[in-house]
Image (cartoon, rainbow, N blue to C red):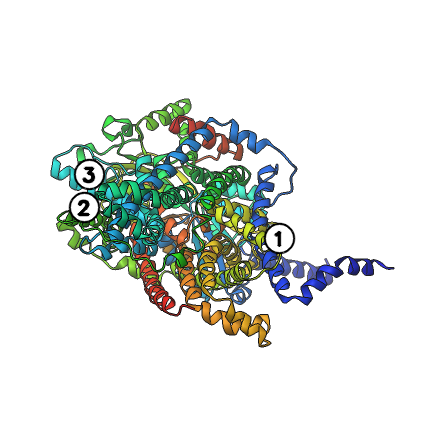
Amino acid sequence: MNLRAKGGMLLLLVAGVSLLLMSGPAGAQPVNVEAAKKEGQVVVYGAQVPQAMEGVNKGFEKKYGIRVDYWRGSSTQVAERALSEFRAGKPGYDVVEGNRGVQLIMRDEGLFAKFIPPSSEKFPAKFKEKDGMITPWRALPISILYNTELVKPNEVPKTLDDLLSPKWTGKLSVPDPTRHTTTAQFFWNLSKFKGDKWLDYVKALAKQKPILVESLAPVTTTIIKGEAAVGITYIKYVKQYKGPVTYVLMDKYLTDPNYMSLSAKTTRPNAAKLYIDYICSPEGQKATAEEGEFPMLPGIVPPIKDAEKVVPGMVFMDNPSEEEFSKLMNTTFRQIFFGQ
Amino acid sequence: MNGTAVLTRAFDRPIRAVTRDPQVAVLAAVGIVIAYLSLSPTLMLLYGSFLSKPLGVPGVFTLRHYVRAYADPLTYQLLLNSFIFAAGSSVLATGLAAIIAWITVRTNAPLRKVFQLTAIVPNIFPPVMLAVAWGALLSPRTGLLNRFAMQIFGLDEAPLNIYSLWGMIFVEGLITTPLAFLIVSASLQSMDPSLEESARVAGSTNLQIARRITLPIVRPALLASLTLNFVRAIESFDTPAIIALPARIEVFTTKIYREAIGAFPPNQNIAATYAVSLLLISMIFVYLYRRLTSRSERYVTVTGRGYRPMIIDLGKWRYAATSVAALILLLIVVLPFAVLLFVSVVSYLHVPGAKTWELLTLDHYRSNLTDSRTYRALQNSLILAIGGATICMLLASITAYMTTKTKVAGRSLIEALTFIPWAFPGTALAIGLLWTYVYVPLPIYGTLWILLIGYITRFLPYGLRTMTSTVVQVHDDLPDASMTCGAGLWATFRRVLLPLLRPGFIAGWIILATIYLREFSTSIFLYSPGSEPIGPLLYHFYVDGNLGPMCSLGVIVSVICLILIIVAQRLGRTGAQVDV
């Protein structure tokens, strides 16, 4: 090999290495911090309750001087707003946060652009999306919550089946599955535990005359107020709401991963990317856990009693297609819960 | 001859008419604005209900949505529910209003002036708050009144359940009582007392006079109140949002909400078909209302003067009358506001007791005053209230002047056009506006502008009402004299009319501003996260179960509105003195 060829090889090697270094971990896209700061603002529509976003949003604002405008609705409402604005050609958001079900629907409608934040590379491979269109950032295990003043220790339900006992008739709270996508999805995923019998369970639960609320958050407040004694909702709410409420430790929990996605039509792409990257960084993930969330980064758990015992029991839910969702919510569950 | 010349000639005559007479020009401009505001959402609502594809997606004509809506037996159930709800609450409101109006206007019951508060105070509450307050009082498990009743009478079950059709009727009845009170008390006040005196001289007893003389005279007012409150209830989304949705009772407005926002995927086409039906029902009843009041309404302030209604001596019964009125005041004002205050200063809702001291907190106020979303909502609502009320009152002043003081042809057409906003239910208007502005290539959809347009359209009749009754009182000589002295239309309007109309203008402005600050039924459909006003934010607090922040924000808004109302009352009084 002559000198020139050697030089060429060396150049190639240097170029290759520097390219690797520049691009960070495989597939991840670098973020231009300066451009993001110039954009100065990021608008996020999300399903997370605002009090639980405060820490992480303040941290981001402080670190980069970029203002975060956060608007919260239920996952369903977030998807409805984002879809309507997108179809009208007037999207007001830069980043959309929400559960997997609605995120996939929005992705398929073309709302998102591909973005893999460099900081998400340390997330366990099983949580990552192959196409990089949506980025997981927190997991939401669902369990039974109960009012510690109304439910005696020996009466605490231990499994979902215990909720069918006559003593909880009319004292049980769940979101309305004809209006709330995650709840529809939760019921549908009970097949993971109950096989074909999942629908029988839902029917039996409907016979318990549950107090139906808008989404999973008000299940907790219904329990705290004593309107319901028990309910099905996210474990994290025992940290996020004040009052006499705790959760039931079980073997397995249907779990809803939530995602952050970059708007395909954003006018502030850099700030939006930087925001998603910050949320997935150790700093963002710790701030997330502090608020009671189960983040994606291994080894970080929220300050909830026995939280580390919950993590191994998390079973991720599957997603019905848009048609299946529509059939479940508008027909199946409407018949079961409203007799129509 | 080229094309331009043909066009010029074709438009020559009307254009010359407009340029020669500024009154025609102004009338034409006002007419175009009002026609646009009222017709565009109506037509686009119809368009949406016949379109095969969702909002913003090109589609073809279809009857599918009507077939789906009217083949569904549920639709007839909700039609029935809506009618029972609206009829029940309008009867309740008119009944309560008649009692309290009679006591305050016609009897010597002690403290009777205080009970006029029932007509004023509810105008400061965001309407969803009243339903929330009654939820906190009468919810079957946690309702404070239910808990008290269970403790006192040793009951196992709660005696009352707000989450029922009766609960909805009760709350909506209380919410609409002030409106009924205004109509009924105005009629009692403007009654010629000589008729009753003659009956008395002829030997009739109080009861006979009431039955034979008073009742027939106020009957049109009672009917008007029944009709108007029926419309207000059937188009109301405030109470249904808080009570009907959890109680699984479907009425028109909840159905529209569930289809347009609550369902997944949302279906604005089906929502539009239901909205069209609601609009038709509402138009029929508003037409009836107008027929009932066509003679008396406009000049009511003028004929109202000069009579001093006969005061009936109730003797020892006057304390009973005071107690009845006090009970109504308690239901409409005292209890709900006390509950709001209570919930706003404790960590979570509970039966007041020893625990309350530990749970007392100002956190909800603190979080509201520091939260950026609340701050932005307050800012948005203030912009809408100030901007919207100003534009709406300007439009109303010009329209009122043109329709009552000029003889320009076409003014009756404008009056007819204002009928549409009168009858437009807030929810239906909102769906119509969404369908309109998704196609308008201006930054209106998803911004504060669409809310502003919605507010102005829907409440223009309120402004018109105030301004028409003010303009009628201005004597024709003054503007005529100004014109004779050579002042133009604008100079006359600005220098002569506006100062004369100012008290009415300001009073109307404040009424509109307080309505806009609390608006909910239209806003919930039109806002987007960046342009969220207070009404939808309160509802979001509610659906997330954050009653504390909701009630504290409700109290803050009530205080702002209270200040505005007090100023309005002062100005209203000055207005009466500056009569021309």
Q: Which residue is mark 3?
A: A150
How far is mark 2 from mark 1, CA to CA? 52 Å
Secondary element under disc 3, as helix, strand or loop, is loop
Q: From where the camera sits, is residue A309 visible?
A: no
Amino acid type at circle 2 is Val
Q: Chain of mark 3?
A: A
Q: Is residue A277 left or right of residue A90?
A: left
- Measured as percent of width and height from the top left, residue A314 is found at 37, 38
Q: Is residue A323 left or right of residue B104?
A: right
Q: Which residue is mark 1?
A: B440
Q: Are marks 3 and 1 in contact (CB under 8 Å)?
A: no
Q: Is residue B344 left or right of residue A112?
A: left
- Between label 2 and label 1, give the one nearer the viewer: 1
Amino acid type at circle 1 is Val
Q: Chain of mark 2?
A: B
N-terminal of the pair, mark 2 or mark 1, is: 2
Q: Is residue B377 left or right of residue A12?
A: left
- Measured as percent of width and height from the top left, residue A260 is found at 48, 50
How far is mark 3 from mark 1, CA to CA? 55 Å
In percent of the image, x 12 and y 39: which residue is there? B152
In percent of the image, x 44 and y 65: which residue is there? B505
Q: Are marks 2 and 3 in contact (CB under 8 Å)?
A: no
Name the foreground residue: B309 vs A92: B309
Residues at marks 2 and 1, common chain? yes
Give the quadrant of residue A308.
top left
Q: Which residue is mark 2?
A: B351
Amino acid type at circle 3 is Leu
Q: Say which quadrant the C terminus of chain B sits in.
A: bottom left
